[in-house]
Image: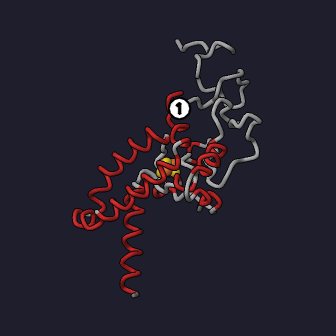
């Protein structure tokens, strides 16, 4: 026999509210683990250090371009994606869009916006700076602006981001940025 439908108000804590259903105060339809918010907010507070670190890290990755090329970018894609997913998943709750915008968004991942907006907040930010869809989550874009104000190149937040290319999902941003930088460097050296 099928389980009886839960009565209103008897849903398990944190259960996803049915679409359009009344949502009790303090319950978010997409509640995520509290520690993830904590780490995300830490990353925003330390955006200047993370920006500095990422620039050094990108330089090292570019230095290793001959190695990636020798092994084959396709062959290193899988292990590097694994590392990237875990490191950025822990620090930023990364969704592996494959086109990382963290350097332009104050180290606040825009893919954590429930509407996945890449160019600023919607009109629904609450007076306390929280999201209108997830009332207990600070708005990703309010955090992005705060983080960008600490960064040396924080005004990059004013640049318009392209729409997400869905074909790049689950691929490594690190490798793609490296391959593009190496190609640009080679093209520049041919011209000169
Ligand atoms: S912008 Fe994309 S790659 Fe960067 S942290 Fe967010 S989901 Fe991950």
Query: In the figure, residue 86 lies in which quadrant?
Result: top left
The residue nearer to you, when weighing 76 against 46, is 46
Do we see residue 176 in this rendering? yes
Query: In the figure, residue 60 lies in which quadrant?
Result: bottom left
Q: Residue at x 43, y 56 (%)?
A: 173
Q: Residue at x 41, y 69 (%)?
A: 181
Residue lying at the far left in this picture: please name it.
70
Q: Is mark 1 within 8 Å of ligand 1?
A: no
Q: Position of residue 126 (x, y in %)?
A: 75, 36
Q: Position of residue 81 (x, y in %)?
A: 36, 50
- The image shows residue 63, relative to residue 98, as above or below, that is below
Q: Position of residue 48 (x, y in %)?
A: 52, 50
Relative to 120, 82 lies left or right:
left
Relative to 68, 13 lies left or right:
right
Query: In the figure, residue 138 lies in which quadrant?
Result: top right
Circle 1 residue? 38
Q: Residue at x 55, y 43 (%)?
A: 44
């Amino acid at each position: 026999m099928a389980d009886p439908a839960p009565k209103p108000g008897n849903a398990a804590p944190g259960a996803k509210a049915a679409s359009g259903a009344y949502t009790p105060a303090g319950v978010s339809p997409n509640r995520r683990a509290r520690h993830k918010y904590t780490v995300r907010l830490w990353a925003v507070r330390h955006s200047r250090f993370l920006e500095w670190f990422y620039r050094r890290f990108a330089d090292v990755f570019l230095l290793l371009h001959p190695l990636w090329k020798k092994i084959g970018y396709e062959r290193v894609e899988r292990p590097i994606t694994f590392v990237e997913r875990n490191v950025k998943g822990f620090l930023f709750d990364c969704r592996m869009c494959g086109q990382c915008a963290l350097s332009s968004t104050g180290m606040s991942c825009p893919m954590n916006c429930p509407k996945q907006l890449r160019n600023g907040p919607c009109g629904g930010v609450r007076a306390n700076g929280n999201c209108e869809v997830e009332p207990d989550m600070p708005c990703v874009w309010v955090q992005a602006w705060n983080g960008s104000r600490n960064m040396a190149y924080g005004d990059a937040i004013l640049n318009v981001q392209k729409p997400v290319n869905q074909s790049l999902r689950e691929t490594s941003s690190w490798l793609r940025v490296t391959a593009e930088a190496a190609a640009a460097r080679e093209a520049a050296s041919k011209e000169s």
